[in-house]
Amino acid sequence: MLSLSGRVGLIFGVANQRSIAWAAAEKTAEYGASVAVTYQGDRLARTVDALAKESNLPLALPCDVTRDEDIDGVFESVSERFGRIDFIVHSVAFAPKEALTGRFTETSRTQFQETMDISAYSLVKIAQRGAPLMSSGGAIVAMSYIGAERVIPNYNVMGPAKAALEANIRYLAHELGPAKIRVNAVSAGPVRTLAAAGIPGFRTMLSKTAEVTPLRRNITTDEVAQSIAFLVSDMSSGITGEIIHVDAGFHIQGASLSS
Ligand code: NAD
Ligand code: IMJ
């Protein structure tokens, strides 16, 4: 049976109740883990503090992943409270809104750099600071999307950022493996969260996806959370450097034609 009893987890990227990070926090806590969550900044403090309180999570901490001092502060707080970490979930992404419409070819240097810093580099910094606290091994999981591998309209600069994130997974898995730290990603199908709100055509994408996936439906946030729980648990002890698609099978299709 999947158990996270006695484990300490740190989950980055809660914005609200719909966040994948929040679903992962609730799920891993249900399986017995002590879970600390982070949120981007003051704007989200009240919402996330309230959620954490409701679900009896021990810590909710601010962390803007572009700031090394914020990341250091989070690890200090968790270390002070628990003395170690068993798993980390990275569920953070950002590209400037203007870069998510129009032509990818027009992406500016600053848009590219900001997107890469928040959505890809942050995993390296988090692993760098987290690994020393995983003294008896551990697991790191990040969130990806098929836009890393294939062209998805409007995903634009996020595509190269997720491609870099997936490469980070492999390089970190290679280096941290000897310390018994596994590093994997979940590549999720589209789910309705803040990061998907306001994306032009998102609703159409959801209905079209449900028509063509082998399972003939979309995935749920709960299914993503289950897979995250699996990847941070001993049930996946032989898996590292892997990108698991939790997308109702969308990624295997060679043509978007149902028959
Ligand atoms: P979400 O908006 O709830 O989560 C994204 C989080 O990133 C937010 O909490 C936001 O505050 C945080 N963030 C942005 N900039 C930050 C910064 N500078 N510092 C710290 N945090 C910052 O949406 P979500 O869908 O739960 O997204 C979580 C992850 O899942 C992302 O990596 C996203 O790319 C990925 N993902 C989402 C979908 C989807 O369809 N929703 C599909 C596949 C993958
Ligand atoms: C995001 C953009 C374009 C198409 C998209 C998405 N599709 C899906 C997403 C089809 C499923 C959601 N997704 C997988 C993401 O990784 C979203 C990242 C994101 C979303 C926003 C919206 C608000 C903003 N910046 C963002 N940066 C990254 O200002």
Image (cartoon, grey):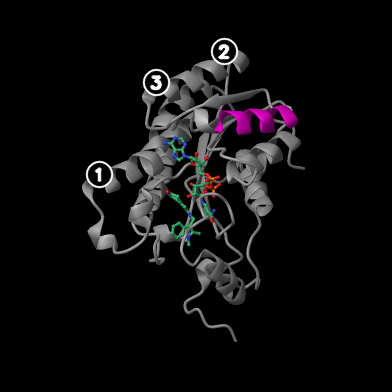
Q: Is mark 2 within 8 Å of ligand 1?
A: no
**The stretch drawn in magenta includes residue 76:** no
* Residue identified by numbered label 2: 80
* Residue mark closest to the camera, 2 vs 1: 1
Residue type at mark 1: give it.
Answer: Thr
Query: Which segment is the magenta one?
Result: 44-54
Assign the magenta stretch its main secondary structure.
Answer: helix
Earlier-in-chain disc, 3 versus 1: 3
User: Cα distance, mark 3 to mark 1?
Assistant: 22 Å
Residue with the mark numbered 1:
110
Local secondary structure at mark 1: helix
Quarter occupied by residue 27:
top right
| Badge count | 3
Q: Which residue is under mark 3? A: 69
Q: Residue at x 51, y 74 (%)?
A: 253
Residue at 47% x, 22% y is 132
Q: Which mark is residue 135?
A: none
**Relative horizontal placement of residue 114, taking residue 201 as reference (left or right):** left
The image shows residue 255, relative to residue 57, as above or below, that is below
Element marked by disc 2: helix
For this orientation, the residue located farthest to the top is 80
Q: As displayed, is residue 122 above or below residue 20?
A: above
Pinpoint residue 52: horizontal percent, then vertical percent.
Answer: 67, 30
Q: Find the distance from the CA under tag 2 to the CA under tag 1.
A: 36 Å
Q: Amino acid at mark 2?
A: Glu
The outermost residue toward the bottom is 259
Which amino acid, mark 3? Glu
Viewed as shown, does residue 228 lie left or right of 140? right
| Residue closest to the eye, 239 or 126 | 126
Q: Secondary structure at mark 3?
A: helix
